[in-house]
């Protein structure tokens, strides 16, 4: 006979371990995508914001999700909120299954695992998890009522309001209530009642789309449930909503086979070990199929750019394998801000001058791509990108801050005040907003802010057309030849585009831009240019480092040795000179 064990003690220990692991998974492995979710929305303490959230069905989970997401400014708090939500989902699932004669921890943990998969995707907003929790809460309340009339009243009087509050999340509730009545209740009129349940579930949303909400009828049954996922995430979303109905059906079937049910449910060593194996397998699937380390590193780079922690940006970039446009774009920015762009640029993957900025596309590029314009003091283009990002994503702190600073620099104080007013009604951006509001009433105070000082000093005084996929570096330098970043980015773009003929015309201005020595990659480029063009270009006041000359001689010797086999040459030279401009110049498909 298989020995029974202390079920309560094992449950508490097992659940404690599982939820600690759950917490650490998000706090440590997904910390940057928690930060990203906070930056991706904005909770505003105002009646207008509340009204806007409830202007469509499903306002309650969106509002609550936004409320809690504002605390994701700390990844530890964000992971704790995730864990609390997951624990509530587990408790409610366990209670619902117990009410249907199927008391099983593993089955109750499946919705938590599915949520873990979905929340590993940075596109899955926390409001979606809140919506599912509200669905479980209402159904748990429904099944807790034994009196038939009270349950019917809860559905017919309560479900329409629940639909208005939760939208598409409430549709699954109709199916759950129908299954509960047909399969687990014995009332004679249950079939007639469930028909009216279904009619209510179809008719109320349709009428609300015609009379209350401005929304297309084909979206009224799903909004605001996100379903624009692929692969495992779409599978997890579908299974999340059908899991409880499946378990209810399974419970009814097993109830007919008493012997099988009695073997599955008791808390003995065999069942506990089997349950642990299943949970470990679920955790393995979550880690292997849904955890995206590359995405979290990419968002980590973005996080440290926003914090102006440039060395941390480069540390993460060192760990990022392969080519990623966003990582390359931010890495080059961090190299400039840390004073290493023209010395270390080819220590990292490069994709030409397009690696200095993101393409103009109506996607996430709008959200990330405006940073370089802000740093260049290209104020109007910074405003342009921030506004387009605001239109595409809705209110978010990053875009609002860029707009507020940009219009302050341009002297459009009324417009700047509009955006600062929104930030002033937030929990964590209020102090920043209050400080910048003072600049509107006393512009001289803006001289205390380094970003505003730089942007004012380098404000363009002449008009020019914005380049669609460029940086207008020449135009910025015509307005302000002292724009250091524009000059270094111009040198970098010429290096990246292998345009040495123009580079030799621009390098004489290095002395005016404060270079005490010739940067390494400029030195490498000029040595190469002089050798192959039989020239003697050396900017006045500078000289070539003898060590660099010796390295080039060795590079040229190796290149000559292997030049008949380009593939071998790329391999042999890459081992020793893969981080030089010479290698980037001659082996464009092999760099990094």
Image: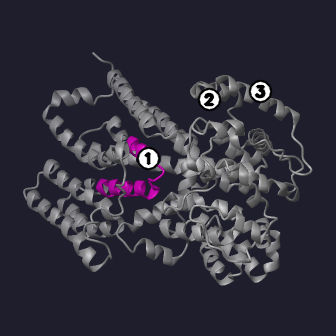
* 216 left or right of 287 in image: left
Q: What is the x, y in percent for residue 377?
A: 72, 66
Q: Which residue is mark 1?
A: 86
Q: Per the image, is 123 magenta? A: yes
Q: Of label 3 and label 2, which has the lower sequence position?
A: 3
Residue 570 image label: 2
Q: Is residue 589 visible?
A: yes
Q: Which residue is mark 3?
A: 554
In percent of the image, x 58 and y 58: which residue is there?
368
Badge 2: how crowded within 10 Å, few (<14), some, or many (20+)? Answer: many
Quick check: 262 above or below 448? above
Taking depth in this image into account, of 327 and 134 the one nearest to the observer is 327
Question: Under tag 2, what secondary structure?
Answer: helix
Q: Of label 1 and label 2, which has the lower sequence position?
A: 1
In percent of the image, x 62 and y 77: which residue is there?
421
Badge 1: how crowded within 10 Å, few (<14), some, or many (20+)? Answer: many
Q: What is the x, y in percent for residue 249?
A: 19, 43
* 377 left or right of 181 in image: right
Q: What is the x, y in percent for residue 43?
A: 54, 67
Quote the CA–CA distance across marks 3 and 2. Answer: 15 Å
Q: What is the x, y in percent for residue 543?
A: 89, 43
Question: Under tag 1, what secondary structure?
Answer: helix
> Is the N terminus in the top left, top right, bottom left or bottom right quadrant?
top left
Quick check: 233 above or below 195? above
């Amino acid at each position: 006979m298989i020995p029974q064990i202390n079920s309560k003690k094992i449950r508490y220990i097992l659940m404690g371990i599982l939820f600690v692991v759950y917490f650490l998974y998000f706090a440590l492995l997904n910390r940057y995508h928690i930060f990203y979710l906070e930056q991706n929305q904005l909770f505003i303490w105002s009646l207008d914001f509340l009204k806007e959230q409830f202007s469509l069905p499903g306002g309650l989970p969106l509002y609550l999700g936004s409320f809690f997401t504002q605390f994701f400014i700390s990844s530890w708090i964000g992971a704790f909120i995730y864990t609390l939500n997951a624990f509530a989902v587990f408790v409610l699932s366990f209670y619902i299954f117990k009410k249907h004669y199927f008391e099983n921890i593993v089955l109750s943990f499946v919705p938590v695992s599915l949520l873990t998969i979905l929340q590993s995707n940075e596109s899955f907003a926390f409001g979606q998890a809140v919506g599912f929790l509200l669905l479980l809460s209402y159904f748990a309340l429904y099944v807790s009522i034994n009196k038939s009339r009270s349950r019917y009243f809860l559905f017919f009087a309560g479900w329409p309001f629940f639909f208005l509050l939760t939208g598409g999340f409430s549709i699954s509730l109709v199916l759950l209530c129908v299954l509960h009545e047909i399969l687990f209740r014995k009332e004679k009129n249950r079939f007639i009642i469930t028909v009216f349940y279904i009619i209510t579930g179809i008719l109320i949303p349709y009428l609300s789309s015609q009379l209350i909400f401005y929304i297309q009828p084909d979206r009224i049954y799903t909004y605001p449930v996100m379903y624009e996922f692929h692969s495992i995430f779409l599978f997890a979303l579908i299974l999340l909503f059908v899991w409880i109905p499946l378990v209810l059906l399974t419970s009814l079937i097993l109830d007919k086979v008493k012997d099988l049910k009695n073997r599955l449910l008791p808390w003995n060593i065999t069942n506990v070990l089997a349950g642990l194996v299943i949970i470990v397998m679920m955790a393995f699937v979550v880690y292997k199929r849904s955890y995206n380390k590359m995405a979290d590193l990419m968002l980590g780079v973005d996080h440290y750019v926003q914090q102006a922690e440039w060395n941390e940006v480069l540390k993460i970039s060192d760990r990022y394998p392969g080519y990623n446009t966003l990582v390359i774009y931010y890495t080059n920015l961090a190299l400039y801000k840390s004073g290493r762009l023209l010395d270390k640029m080819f220590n990292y993957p490069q994709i030409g001058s397009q690696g200095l900025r993101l393409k103009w596309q109506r996607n996430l590029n709008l959200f990330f791509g405006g940073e370089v314009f802000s740093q260049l003091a290209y104020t109007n283009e910074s405003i342009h990108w921030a506004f387009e990002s605001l239109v595409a994503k809705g209110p978010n702190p990053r875009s609002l801050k860029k707009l507020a600073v940009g219009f302050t620099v341009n002297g459009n104080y009324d417009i700047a005040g509009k955006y600062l007013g929104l930030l002033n009604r937030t929990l964590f951006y209020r102090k920043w907003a209050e400080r910048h509001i003072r600049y509107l009433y006393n512009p001289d105070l803006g001289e205390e802010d380094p970003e505003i000082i730089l942007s004012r000093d380098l404000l363009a005084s002449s008009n020019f057309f914005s380049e669609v996929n460029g940086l207008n570096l020449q135009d910025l330098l015509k307005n302000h030849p002292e724009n250091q970043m524009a000059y270094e980015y111009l040198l970098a773009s010429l290096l990246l585009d292998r345009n040495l003929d123009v580079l030799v015309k621009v390098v004489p201005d290095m002395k005016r831009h404060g270079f005490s020595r010739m940067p390494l990659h400029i030195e490498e480029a000029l040595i190469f240019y002089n050798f192959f063009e039989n020239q003697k270009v050396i900017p006045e006041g500078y000289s070539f480092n003898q060590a660099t000359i010796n390295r080039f001689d060795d590079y040229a010797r190796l290149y000559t040795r292997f030049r008949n086999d380009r593939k071998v040459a790329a391999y042999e030279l890459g081992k020793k000179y893969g981080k030089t401009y010479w290698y980037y110049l001659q082996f464009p498909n092999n760099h990094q």
